[in-house]
Image (tube, grey):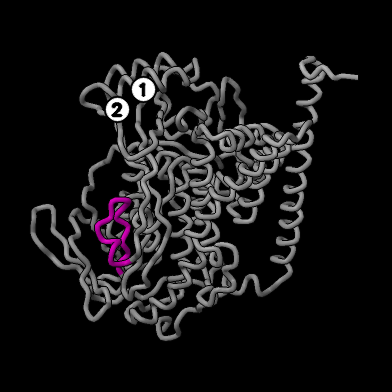
Amino acid sequence: MSHNFTNPLFLFLAMDYMFIFGSVIASSLVLVLFLYGSVSNKRKSSDPSATTHAQSIKTSENGTWTPPEVSEGCDDIIIVGAGVAGAALAFTLGKDGRRVHVIERDLNEQDRIVGELLQPGGYLKLIELGLEDCVDEIDAQQVFGYALYKDGKNTKLSYPLEKFSSDISGKSFHNGRFIQRMRAKASSLPNVKLEQGTVTSLLEENGIVKGVHYKTKSGEELTAKAPLTIVCDGCFSNLRRSLCDPKVDLPSYFVGLILENCNLPYANHGHVILGDPSPILFYPISSTEIRCLVDVPGQKLPSLGNGDMARYLKTVVAPQVPSELHDSFIATVEKGNIRSMPNRSMPASPYPTPGALLMGDAFNMRHPLTGGGMTVALSDIVLLRDLLRPLRDLHDSTALCKYLESFYTLRKPVASTINTLAGALYKVFCASPDPARKEMRQACFDYLRLGGVFSQGPIALLSGLNPRPLSLVLHFFAVAIYGVGRLLVPFPSPTRMWIGARLISGASGIIFPIIKAEGVRQMFFPVTVPAYYRTPPVNLQN
């Protein structure tokens, strides 16, 4: 008896089996993740050694920490740069009693097209630092999740916020307004000095950084000294080369527009369009404005001057924009207010240097597709604050440097998870003529549409609420195996099997190089790194 493979009922049943098979395989991996998480949490709660490091860091919340005595004379800490990381760090360390001297190239409000979306995990860190009021009075918008679009279909992905109070969400805003609020709060402390100037070089003596050389706003050349200099001068840092091994990658550019007089299809949600050749983003930055970011792959942009960029946006991008935003998108392009900036990624590869430390984008960058940069920076600041709190004296630079090597290890699981997710998701979301890459992209979209743990797990990673490396790897390969399952059901033809094998190989080729660059041992097994167990030097506590 012959089968009619073109029969609609047969095709419908075949598709059903394909999705069921893929779902069962993906469910198995997610079940492993769930069981691992349960065991891990039990171990953490029952194993006293798991809290050894945390117990060694006393905080003001438990009433055991007191600010260090501030000595007369020079500053305790110099911070180069007053962006998100620098301003937040200045307030945090100033509140702890340190004398902080911040030198920022331009203290005027900046107009940037990135750093406008703070994930819920980052907002929780902002609260922990006492800076949550910096999103007040700037018309910041709450963000509750994402809407994902592909080939005319869409799905809504909500942040897993059920366990949090109603004010916990993502926050989106004008970056410049947010930074100005943090600068104002930092400079309100009497022991924080905020100065406009350009740092030209680090001041080094016998391999120890003693401070910085800088030019004031008026052009006067000065020197500032402190036991610890923290460099936070952003993605275009001119000081990082002496403090790390910068391997900067430039995968694409963002072209930025601001849309007005329109509403997002899903209110208070970021919108990600899986476009061709790469993703398009929309999210609110005020009650009347929507930011649009168009990713343009490669290292060359269409020219703004001769109209090539406008034509590209109208002919290539506009047809892929949701209908609710299309007219406003075209009107904004015709106005001509188009901005661009390079998207950079750089794994953290520091040279432990006595007297100096790198933070923020000067230290570590990832593709901004997932909006994880501020979450990483604020998480780093919380960690550094807790490491420095037991120390009353910072003048023994060698001992301090050795102790702060623990910072690089302790930050890895959170920072590397967010970094790896950003890099991997960008590669998966970009269009490709390769059949295996196409299947991976479609599998990712359909996996997230399954809902439940299949969407909540990845969104918990994206939001910074559960930045666990193992969770990331398991979900990533659950997507790949889900895609293979769809290919093999109902008939695993040689062509489909070959595409499935290349899908798994391609997925491995995406995520493993990123993990290798981040550091496998520090990312997954930080407790095996000696620096993890560093305790505050006794001579710096007295």
Magenta-drawn segment: 229-243
Asked if 275 appears above or below 99 in the picture, the reply is above
Report the quarter where the C terminus lies. bottom left
* Any part of residue 366 in sight: yes
Pick whichever, 383 or 449, lies toward us. Answer: 449
The overriding secondary structure of the stretch rendered in magenta is loop
Residue at 28% of width from left, 51% of height from top? 236
In the rendered image, residue 170, in percent from the top left (x then y), is placed at: 52, 40
Query: Looking at the rendered structure, which numbered label has been put on residue 402?
Result: none
- Image quarter hosting the N terminus: top right
Judging by the rendered image, the residue that carries numbered circle 2 is 338
Q: Residue at label 1?
A: 313
Q: As shown in the figure, which amino acid type bears the numbered disc 1?
A: Leu
Q: Residue furthest bottom?
A: 539
Give the camera-side residue of 250 and 34: 250
CA distance for labels 1 and 2: 10 Å
Q: Nearer the viewer, residue 331 or 104?
A: 331
Residue 413: % across, % down? 55, 60
